[in-house]
Image (tube, grey):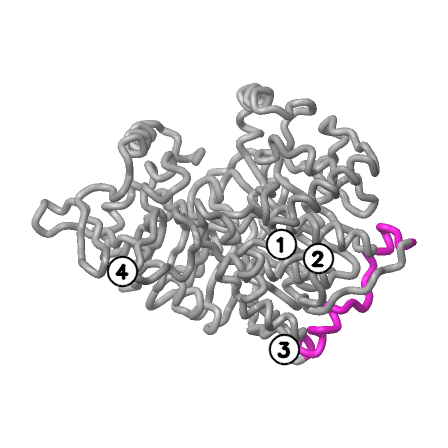
Amino acid sequence: MVPGEKARGLRPAPAADVAISRDQARTSGATLLGDAFAPEVAAHPGQSGFRLLATGLDAFVMRVALAESAQRTLDMQYYIFHADDTGALLTEALLQAADRGVRVRLLVDDYNLVGRDWLAAALDAHPRIEVRVFNPFVAGARGTVSRLIAFLRDPVKLNRRMHNKSFIADGRLAIVGGRNVGNEYFDADRELGFGDLDVLAAGPVAGEIAASFETYWSSESARSLRFLGIRRRGRRILRRFRAALDKRLEKVRRSQYATRLRDTDLAKQLTGSHLDLEWAKADLIADEPAKVVLPVERGEPQSQGFLGLLAQESIQEVILVSPYFVPGERGMASLRSLRARGVRVRILTNSLAATDAPVVHASYRRYRQALLELGAEIHEFKPVVRPPRGARPRLFASARASLHAKAFVFDRRKMVIGSLNLDPRSFFLNTEIGLIIQSEALAGQVAAAFEQLAAPTYSYQVTLSAVRGGRLRWRTQEDGIRVSYDGEPQAGLLRRLLAWGAGLLPIEEHL
């Protein structure tokens, strides 16, 4: 699905009355998205509808479909919004929505906005688009050096970020999960691909996600571009931006990626204005925006409490998928309790060679042997997928792969999916969002994704050697042959030294 082509969404929204005000746009009323799912919402009281977005292509197609179908509002909350090909395609869809009268709001964390103020300013110049920045650096600190100076002056405040990811259309449908906006998240980068998961939500919980966005949008930590010293230059900058965007997208629309988007099963299903959902009870886990300004509490945070409760209710199996896995002493105590009751614990995280944060991996390594001694199963994601000879990998079109999904399955009956990593940063420093979904069908889908990614094609299994004094070994298959390694596979010397050095520092609570 590529913006600018006809009728590929849930249903194309008609042009709205251009006289609609921002306040009027917030009022409730009938919308195409609301009407499309109203009968199913009525048929499933107390439940919400869900669809797992397991591939980057489907995740991008769904976002564009929501942008094309929205009639009143589009609200987006992201840690990262890249100005690359997928960022350009999505930006075009947002501009087209705003042109037909949809109110568009984008809340982005300031940490990754360096060098992209022009993008924020151009969007904000549209009369129906507003951009706000969360927990910004001081006004005027827009360059790399000035930001570094600001960070050194106030590291406690600026080390705490908004990690939430949500995309909400008309307050009726929402996407949450691990994906930011960028080529690597949507299978459009030939060099790097992130294995990730999102979920589309309809029904009552979508309204809760919209309410959470509203809380962030109106918080004291969400600042306008004017506060940052970025002047609103009016329609001139917007015209120049559109011209540059159109020129860039001419090539993108003719690309192989555009063809792959159009050929997905989801895109074809949406062409017929049909979308299958799984209905189930769900709860929203969402930090308050004030988390980034309140003192860091060493007590149990809300998200960690929910996960601990779900784990302790499990009687057979717990599956933990997190790109960064630093359980801490509290997490280790919970895992010991699970193993003492005979619960199978299965973990998928990045290998040292695959991670984009070797410093965090250094803290994970402190717990790895203890986890194996407890009887936990550990699988570490490979940096380069090596499919069987003559075949191509099914999940990635890039040369390098890295795990970015955050999903947890309990007895294959309940699951959690969102932006939350299993590390101190997510629990204590950043704000996060996620969904607890009570669905055997969806939990089974995530468990199946785990089985695929944990298999030898994509991962190493870390074990304790029975003949080498209990030292670690990494087992996998390459070209159909079983192989094992005695050290971190495929990790270069620099990464090994960085991880070793970071492991000597007392910085775990800041990771």
Tell me the amino acid under the disc marked 3: His
Tell me the amino acid under the disc marked 4: Arg
Are the two marked residues, 3 and 4, in contact with CB atoms closer than 8 angstroms? no
Magenta: predominant secondary structure element? helix
Q: Position of residue 58 (x, y in %)?
A: 55, 62
Residue 205 bears which disc, if any? none
Residue 389 bears which disc, if any? 4
Question: N-terminal of the two: label 1 or label 3?
Answer: 3
Comparing 173 with 9, the one in front is 9
Under circle 3, the secondary element is loop
Q: Position of residue 332 (x, y in %)?
A: 33, 48
Q: Is residue 457 visible?
A: yes
Residue at screen point 60% across, 73% down:
269
Comparing 30 with 251, the one in front is 251
Residue 329 quadrant: top left
Q: Would residue 30 be counted in the magenta stretch?
A: yes
Question: N-terminal of the two: label 2 or label 4?
Answer: 2
Are the two marked residues, 1 and 2, in contact with CB atoms closer than 8 angstroms? yes
Q: From the image, which quarter does the N terminus lie in? A: bottom right
Q: Position of residue 17 (x, y in %)?
A: 89, 59
Question: N-terminal of the two: label 2 or label 3?
Answer: 2
> Which residue bears the numbered disc 2?
4
Question: N-terminal of the two: label 3 or label 4?
Answer: 3
Are the two marked residues, 1 and 4, in contact with CB atoms closer than 8 angstroms? no
> Which residue bears the numbered disc 3?
44
Using the numbered discs, state the Cα–Cα distance from disc 2 to disc 4 in whole angstroms.
39 Å
Range shown magenta: 19-42
Under circle 4, the secondary element is loop
